[in-house]
Image (cartoon, rainbow, N blue to C red):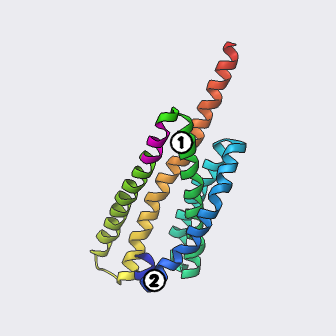
Amino acid sequence: MLAQDYLNTAPFTAGLILFPGSLLGAAIAPYAGRLLDKRGALLPLTIANTSMFLGCWLFYFGMPILSAGTMVLIYIFLRVGFNFGFGNTLSDASKQVSLEEKADINSLFNTFQQYVGSLGTSVLSAVISAIQLQGDSTLGMLTARGSQIDFILLAVLVGTGLLTVFICQHLKRKNASISSFKE
């Protein structure tokens, strides 16, 4: 919607803008998994949330100079962040359940990904539509304004995720020091 309404691109071009980020995100997933295996969850989840957080703010602040090229580059931040986080979160969750439940975890994650994606798309589209109904500017400018609100909402959610990663790491260290103290 942003590429089509604000940048006046054709639907095909708007789809192509997402293509490099999706490709790079898919290519980086195995590296993210190896990083999880070697260094634990903290680094890949920090990279994931930081990348998505930066991507949201780059979209927000970069709106006045946004072009198809800058949109490709910023979307790469979002996609790499997502791929760093989703696969590693799924892998870590699989370690927390019995062998019989592993297939259920995979199904659960993929189902929730689809539901959250649908819900997120609906909410973010509703925000843009509400701004567009104001009608005090061009459709492209109203779409940009609504998208900026969306990127703030997404940055808050991702920031919460990043904070959660650090809180979990702090609690993990605290519990480890308490366990070693008791021994």
The residue tagged 2 is 12
Q: For residue 30, what is the image quadrant?
A: bottom right
Residue 73 disc label:
none
Question: What type of secondary structure mainly makes up the magenta span?
Answer: helix
The residue tagged 1 is 164
Q: Nearer the viewer, residue 141 or 117?
A: 117
Q: What is the x, y in percent for residue 133?
A: 27, 74
Lateral position of residue 15 relative to residue 176, left or right: left
Q: What is the x, y in percent for residue 118?
A: 36, 60
Q: Secondary structure at mark 1?
A: helix
Q: Residue at x 52, y 69 (%)?
A: 59
Q: Residue at x 45, y 79 (%)?
A: 3
Q: What is the x, y in percent for residue 61?
A: 54, 69
Q: Amino acid at mark 2?
A: Phe
Q: Residue furthest right?
A: 38
Q: Amino acid at mark 1?
A: Thr
